[in-house]
Image: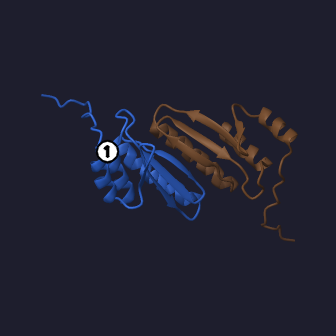
Chain colours: A blue, B brown
Amino acid sequence: MEEAKKQVPRKKLSAEEIENALNDLDGWKIENVNLKKRFEFSNFAESLAFVNRVGAIAEAADHHPDIRFGWGYAEFSITTHDTGGLTKNDFDLAAAIENL
Amino acid sequence: MEEAKKQVPRKKLSAEEIENALNDLDGWKIENVNLKKRFEFSNFAESLAFVNRVGAIAEAADHHPDIRFGWGYAEFSITTHDTGGLTKNDFDLAAAIENL
């Protein structure tokens, strides 16, 4: 039997699950149903290099953050649009960015 | 005589100069003293590829936009922070992005 390509539906986390997951991360916060963090860098090139590393893991995970960046900073916002809430995928991506 | 490495001070453009410069661009608008445009793409990888091309010209010009991007879009905001207004450099960078 061929394995279905369709992704397993993503389960919206409860408030308690979100609180626990947030405790496992460093410096991330929730804002408008998005998991967010700002990173600081020394110049534009370093920001862009970090953004590209995040881009690679986002593509691998097929889960894509919204990114703001410029000279000396990069901010990531992660949510699961189709679920309308935060899911384990969001926290997994945040952890992967954290571990870069 | 050696040429000075210091950049020529950037002159804040007048309202009329801004209007004329804006007429030479396609789809850019002014918002909070920033020159802005949103581009649409088919997926995350295309957005990131475009952002990298903009990053290369920003580094070459030593003039860096603020960038927001994610799955299917990239938005650029350009201003000259030290001048506190729009300058020719901002419009030159916008034109270079436009011509990519």
**Vertically, is A24 above or below B13?**
below
Q: Position of residue A5 (x, y in %)?
A: 25, 31
- Nearer-the-camera pick, A87 or A43: A87
Q: Is residue B8 left or right of residue A28?
A: right
Q: Residue A92: where, in percent of width, then height?
A: 31, 50
Badge 1: chain ID: A
In the rendered image, residue A53, in percent from the top left (x then y), is placed at: 43, 53
Residue drawn where x is 29% and y is 45% of the image? A88
- Drawn side of residue B14 relative to residue A1, left or right: right
Q: Relative to B94, does residue A42 appear above or below in the rendering?
A: below
Is any part of residue B3 visible from this angle?
yes
State the residue at coordinates (28%, 55%). A20
User: In the image as oriented, which residue stretches furthest toward the left?
Assistant: A1
Q: Quadrant of the C terminus of chain A?
A: bottom left
Question: Which quadrant of the figure has residue B17?
Answer: top right
Q: Residue furthest front?
A: A15
At x 59% / y 40%, what residue is drawn? B75
Of A27 and B58, which appears nearest the observer? Answer: A27
Name the quarter where the N terminus of chain A is drawn: top left
Crowd class of label 1 (few under 14; some 14 to 19; many from 20; radius 10 Å): some
Numbered label tally: 1
In the image, is B57 to the left or to the right of A1? right
Q: Quadrant of residue B51?
A: top right
Vertical placement of residue B19 versus A54, above or below: above
Q: Residue at the bottom extreme? A: B1
Residue type at numbered disc 1: Asn
* Residue A100 visible here: no
Give residue B53's position: percent from left, percent from top.
58, 45
In the rendered view, would you say A29 is above or below B99? below
The local secondary structure at tag 1 comes to helix
Q: Residue beneath label 1, please? A: A89
Image check: A47 left or right of B16?
left
